[in-house]
Image (cartoon, grey):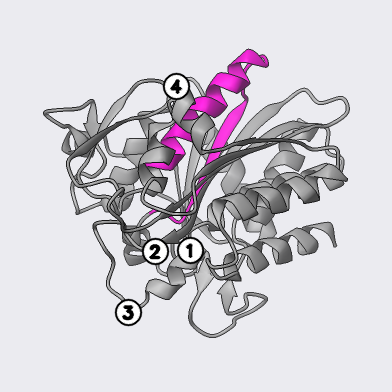
Amino acid sequence: EIIAKYTHLTRDLINTPPSHLTPDSFSLRFKKLAASLGVKVEILNESQLIKGGYGGIIGVGQGSANPPRLLRLSYSGKGAKKRYAFIGKGITFDTGGLALKPAQGMEAMKSDMSGAAAVCAAVLAIAELKLPIHIDAWAALAENMVSDKATRPSDIITIYGGKTVEVLNPDAEGRLVLADAMVRAAEVGKKAGGLDGMVDVATLTGAQVVALGTRTSAVMTNNESFREQFLTLAEITGEAFWPMPLPEELRASLDSPVADMANIGDRMGGMLVAGLFLKDFVDSELPWLHLDIAGPAYNEAKAHGYTPVGGTGVALRTLVALAESSAAK
């Protein structure tokens, strides 16, 4: 019942038009919901993000009249020994920025915050289930718009923590906001005694849909046993995930002559290249999963099974199962 409730919340948020869901209203919605569950909330606004050096979130969100946010929900269960961070891509609308998307089909880009909705709702579900675990959800929230302030192709931004990125394509924006949140989440986790794992969830690449279709999500990792734990749980929850590699030879395509790296590389294997980009922002010792849910997050075909038309809420059930299974270990 609790998982169903938060699955519906995730779906409702995904289906909410961007006129009614902005980085700010998304944050405030979760702040209100978290209050009764003893979940702590931290919201960084635009000026705090600029001051803090969150160049990815600012770079993506600066073109919009709806300023970006970084939302953190913190839950600490009684008797918790394990600590995890869930990071969600929260682009409340994605026009592609100055790399403007075609008009046909753009309306579905209200679903580009599906990852953020799933990780935040998962933490509320975990809190309501009173699981003995520490979990932080981080939602990197921005609206990727076209304006005179928008990031230009060839601009260089500095991600939180100091790495520079040449933005060759402003429509490869999800990885930029995630990078900020991932570095910050690891930093906070380290101060609290260290993370046992990190999971990022994102409608990240069209290449994911080309490779796996609209019903199967991709899992990439730097730790095979963590991936196997997740895939075993996904079979139980009924969410379709498939393991994908992170081939080192593709990493060179992200090299930039003017920054530490570029935000796009080889078009072939684009889903894997995006995963390799994110891998650069994770300590190799920290077990990490990257879930690309681009296809399955939003169902534009007919309803099937218990999957409705529109937002599906994919990943939420398996994230809750992961917390449950890890807490029991």
Q: In the rendered structure, which amino acid carries the disc numbered 4?
A: Asp
Q: CA distance from mark 4 to mark 1?
A: 27 Å
Please report whichever mark, 4 or 3, sits nearer to the chain's N-terminal start: 3
Asked whether residue 233 is in view, the answer is: no
Residue occupied by mark 3:
104
55 vs 268: above or below: above
Q: Nearer the viewer, residue 248 or 172?
A: 172
303 vs 245: above or below: below
Numbered badge on residue 283: 4
**Residue lying at 33% horizontally and 51% vertically, measured from the top left:** 271
Return the x and y of residue 36 as percentages of the image width and height: 88, 45
Mark 1 secondary-structure assignment: loop
Give left or right: position of 242 versus 39.
left
Please report whichever mark, 3 or 1, sits nearer to the chain's N-terminal start: 3
Tag 1: Cα neighbours inside 10 Å, few (<14), some, or many (≥20)?
A: many
Q: In the rendered structure, which amino acid carries the disc numbered 2?
A: Leu
Q: Are marks 1 and 2 in contact (CB under 8 Å)?
A: yes
Give left or right: position of 285 versus 119.
left
Residue occupied by mark 2:
212
Mark 3 secondary-structure assignment: loop
**Residue lying at 38% horizontally and 33% vertically, measured from the top left:** 55
Q: In the rendered structure, which amino acid carries the disc numbered 3?
A: Gln
Numbered badge on residue 216: 1
Q: CA distance from mark 4 to mark 3?
A: 39 Å
Magenta residues, start to end: 176-204
Return the x and y of residue 46 as percentages of the image width and height: 50, 38
**Residue lying at 53% horizontally and 30% vertically, measured from the top left:** 48
Asked whether residue 127 is in view, the answer is: yes
